[in-house]
Structures are given as structure tokens and as C-alpha cells.
Image (cartoon, rainbow, N blue to C red):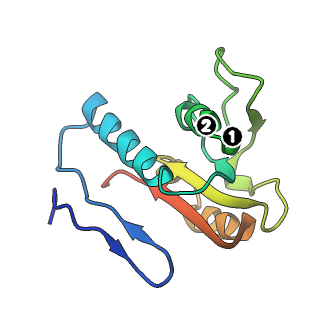
Amino acid sequence: MQGTQKKDISRRGRVSLPLPPKRRAGRRNRAVIRQTVLQVFRTFLPGKVLDAPAGNLWLSKTLADWGFTVYAVDIITPPAAFSSALSFLQVNLNCGLPFADSAFDYVASVEGIEHLENPAAFLRECSRVLRPQGKLLLTTPNI
């Protein structure tokens, strides 16, 4: 059911948030997605976050302001307004992640997995770099 306020927390710590009602693609939809992602992160204790792909760094900047240690990665170069307070690496997410095993408490992938050649390989990499009990926050459009 779309638009319901159901929240389900399973034994494995996964959280299901309500789906926003279907709307036309655009700014309004993007705002709902961003609001939902931030709502989830508000429930997490500050820790080490991988933002992949980071895009225009909206999530990285917000989480850094909230006390998270953020590593932003993307295939594009950082935006002109890039803050040196953030760690940014230019990475092709189709080629693996250049981080050690169990390096992150959280991995965020907001509206990016659908652009990858091999989404399953990316998910395996996310699992590899997450610490035990780490959390993956992934969104993708309904395509």
C-alpha cells in the first residue's frame, strides 16, 4: 500500500519506511527521496559513511554536519563548491571500491545503482566494505 505509515523492523535490523505516493518525476519526487533518506539517517548513531555515488554531495555535506565521517565517491569530479572537510575520491563504481574490508558503518547509495553496468557486483562490494551489523541504505527509482 502506498502512502501508508507502516514501519517494520525485522530481526536483521532492516527498516522499511513508507513509500511516497507515486508522482511525476522531478523536483518534488527528489525532495521526498532526500527527506526519507535523511529521516533514516537521523535514527543512526554517527559513524563512518560511504556515499556512493555522491553526485552533488548533498547527502555527504548534511551527514558531515551531523557528525558523521563521510567518504564521498563518484565517477564525476567533485562540484565546484566541494568542501575540503569531506573526503572525496573519483571512483568508477563498476570497478569495485578502493576500501578495506569492513571499513564502514553505513553505505548510502541514493538513486545511483540503476546507472551501473553490474548492480549485483556493486552490492557485493557494499557488503564487503560494511562492518558486521553495518547498514546499507539504497534507493532506486521504480523502473
Q: Is residue 62 above or below residue 42?
A: above
Left or right: 66 as drawn, with respect to 33: right
Q: Is residue 7 above or below residue 55?
A: below
- Quadrant, the C terminus: bottom left
- Report the number of discs: 2
- Quadrant, the N terminus: bottom left
Mark 1 touches mark 2? (CB < 8 Å): yes
Q: How packed is label 1: few (under 14 Cα within 10 Å), some, or many (20 or more)?
A: many
Tell me what residue is drawn at x 68 percent, y 21 percent.
82
Mark 2: amino acid: Ser
Which residue is nearer to you in this view: 115 or 125? 125
Q: Earlier in the sequence, mark 1 or mark 2?
A: 2
User: In the image, residue 41 lies at what x, y percent?
Assistant: 50, 51
Mark 1: amino acid: Ala
Which residue is nearer to you in this view: 134 or 79? 134
Residue farthest top in this picture: 80
Q: Which residue is mark 2?
A: 60
Q: Secondary structure at mark 1?
A: strand
Q: Which residue is mark 1?
A: 72
Tell me what residue is drawn at x 46 percent, y 85 percent.
11
